[in-house]
Structure formats: C-alpha cells, structure tokens
Image (cartoon, coloured by chain):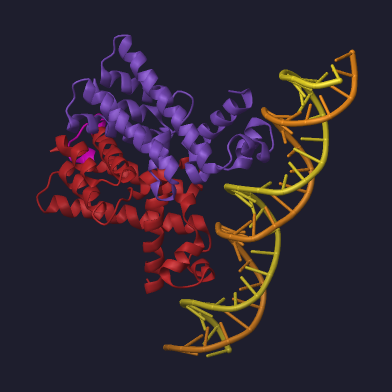
Chain colours: A purple, B red, C orange, D yellow
Amino acid sequence: MTDTVGAILDAAERRIREAGYSGFSYREIAVDVGVKAASVHYHFPSKDTLAAAVAHRYNDRVLEAVEAGMASGLDAIQAWRAVFRDALRDGPRMCLCGALGAASADLPPGVMVEVHRFFRSGLDSLRKAGLSEDRATQVMAVLEGAILMATAQSDPEIFDRATAALD
Amino acid sequence: MTDTVGAILDAAERRIREAGYSGFSYREIAVDVGVKAASVHYHFPSKDTLAAAVAHRYNDRVLEAVEAGMASGLDAIQAWRAVFRDALRDGPRMCLCGALGAASADLPPGVMVEVHRFFRSGLDSLRKAGLSEDRATQVMAVLEGAILMATAQSDPEIFDRATAALD
DNA sequence: GTCTCCTTATCTGACGATAGGTAGATAACG
DNA sequence: CGTTATCTACCTATCGTCAGATAAGGAGAC
C-alpha cells in the first residue's frame, strides 16, 4: 500500500465520519492528500469503490481492536465500549458504519454490503462472548446511539453518560 | 399552512430521514410534490431554512406524541419507545434528528440548532419523569442506535430486540 | 552501458449532469 | 391594484468521471 493510497483512505474515512457518504467529494479528498482529483480516481476508479474500501479497512481494524482489548483482559462489552470511546478522542466523529447506515437510501450496493458486515460481525462478536441476541443488539445500539448523540452535540461526555451503565 | 407547504415539508422530511441533509435536493422535493423547483424556493428560500422548518415541525410533533402517550397511561420510557417504533411503521427511515446529527459537519447552523433542541428537550422529558441524567441519556441513545441499526439493515425487528430490555 | 518498452503514478483539461438559487412573466383572487 | 402562488428560463458552482499527456523507473535485448 502506497503512502498516497493510505492517505486517501485516511482522508475519506475522516470525511465520511463527519459528513456521510454524500458529504464528501473527490476534490476534497484530493486537497486533503495534496494531489489532484484525477489521481484519486487512478487508485479508486469510482466513489463507491473508494467508500467500500474505506469501510472494509474500518471493519477489520475495529474487530482487531476489540479482540486486542479482550486479549488484554477486558470483557466483550468493555472492549467494544473502549473502541467506540477511543474513536471520539480525536474529535466529534461518528462510527463510520453508523454514519453510512444513517443515510442508507443513497448508498451504493457495494458500500451497503460493508455496512451490513460491520453490524453482523459486531453482533457475532458479542454473542460469541455469551450475550443473548437481545442483549447484544441492545449493547450495539447504545454504542451507536451514544456516539451519534456525542457527535451531534460535540460533547464526548454524552457518550460516557449514555454508556455508564454498561459496566 | 397551504397544502403545498405541507406537502413540501412531508416530502423533505421523508427524504432527509432516508438520506440525510446532503441526500435530498430541491428538484427531488419538487417532483415528489408535483410542482417546479422554483416554487419550492418561493415557500422556503434556501435549503437550510427548509431543513430547519422540517426539523422544527418534527421536534414539536414528536414531543406532542410522547406527551399523548404518557397521558394515555404509558410511562416516559414506554412513550418514547412507542414513538420511535411507530416511525419505523411506514418503512426503514431514521429519526430525523438522528439522520441530521450523524452528518453534523455539513449542517448549516440553523439546522444544527433544531437538532440540539431535539436532544435537549428529549432528555428533559425523560428527566422530568424521574430518570437520572445518565439513565435518560442511555435511554435516548438506545432508541437512536436501535432505529439506526434497524434502518441500516431494513429490519424493524432489530429495533424490537434492541429495546426489549427497556420495558 | 544504453536503447527500447511497459508500467506506475501523476498531471491538465475537459465532459455532461446536477446542485442551490434568482429574475421575470403569468394567472388567480380579493 | 396588490398579493399570492406558480411558472419558464437561466445562472454559477460543483459533482463524478474520463481522455490524453507527462515523467520516472524497472526489465530485457543488443
């Protein structure tokens, strides 16, 4: 993976988490990275392939971070909570798949696939840790809603209050 | 309020709940309503005034519905849950202010004000019913996350599972 | 060594489509 | 006559996308 490719993915991820799928453009990404828009198209031919690549990398990274948390002693709920909380460290930004899924009507199919994969594997991870399906769904909903409210109001403490009872 | 104005607000609300602020356009609204885009501009001069009007009406209507639910015997949590659940009756669509807040970086200030008002008055409503601040925030987060997940996966039962433990 | 050939990564410059928004005319109505 | 509501026609900006040029560098052939 070239430097440029990684920088494009980073910039796109940040923009999507702040403004959703239709809230970012090739030209913005190009400015962020310091190349021209055509160069972004060279690496990612279309907007949906770029967004799908961003979501794919995001899904893998989140799952890895959760497993790392559990390997270091946290239970599954604490590990998921920590990963979501860390995402708020560098500014008020949504969960990527939450930001995409909230505007699902204008998502291309290839992006939707990755969004579904995120939620499916998230619930699987919690169920594998012993939670019931209802409880796993509730935990994931609290986390998504908490990061949404914290983002919308630019106040990370809202996340802490919403998830305090998860411990 | 003219028929046209109401129809514009209805169409805009539906589109925003499906695709967010940057996922709807004057031309789409005009087609939905059956007028020309310039006529929509006559009633709502700019996109942010239209979106702010939609959000304002939404906020008032949701609060009214919650109070009606409480007047007919539901406790505050049950009333809020019922209002969110009803919003999923006619298709997989987000909470309007959830859809707007999830992409808050490209929201004009006037729209952001209404989003903030929604969450503030929602938490107030729950706190006035006796919930602690933490608990009120948690309940609202579950509801927002539940409707987000149900929308993203086009499955209203996800909402039911996520909120089953609220009863 | 160096001369060709292909690939990689970037650029310039444009395409058609669509965005939000405006000006000015028209028709209906009190 | 003035107000209200709608229209047609247009503006400028930006969108995603593409074609074609350019420069750098490695791979083989001589």
* Left or right of A125 in this view: C14: right
Query: Which quarter shows the C terminus of chain B?
Result: top left
* Left or right of B153 in this view: D2: right
> In this rendering, does residue A33 appear at all?
yes
> In this rendering, does residue A162 appear at all?
no
* Left or right of A124 in this view: D3: right
Q: Nearer the viewer, residue A107 or B52?
A: A107
Please report the bounds of the magenta region as a residue range: B126-135
Which quadrant would residue B138 be assigned to in this image?
Answer: top left
Q: Nearer the viewer, residue A151 or B19?
A: B19
Whether residue B127 appears in magenta in the rendering, the answer is: yes
Is residue B127 positioned above or below B15 on the image? above
Percent across and percent down for residue B135 are 22, 31
Percent across and percent down for residue B6 are 37, 67
Is residue B108 positioned above or below A124 on the image? below
Task: Kindly identify the residue that appears in the image at 18 percent across and 21 percent down.
Answer: A130
Q: Nearer the viewer, residue B82 or B92?
A: B92
Which quadrant would residue A93 be assigned to in this image?
Answer: top left
Task: Kindly identify the residue that appears in the image at 58 percent across and 43 percent down.
Answer: A25
Percent across and percent down for residue C2 are 90, 19
| Magenta stretch: dominant secondary structure | helix
Task: Kindly identify the residue that appears in the image at 49 percent across and 33 percent down.
Answer: A53
Query: Which quarter shows the N terminus of chain B?
Result: bottom left
Is residue B24 positioned above or below A27 on the image? below
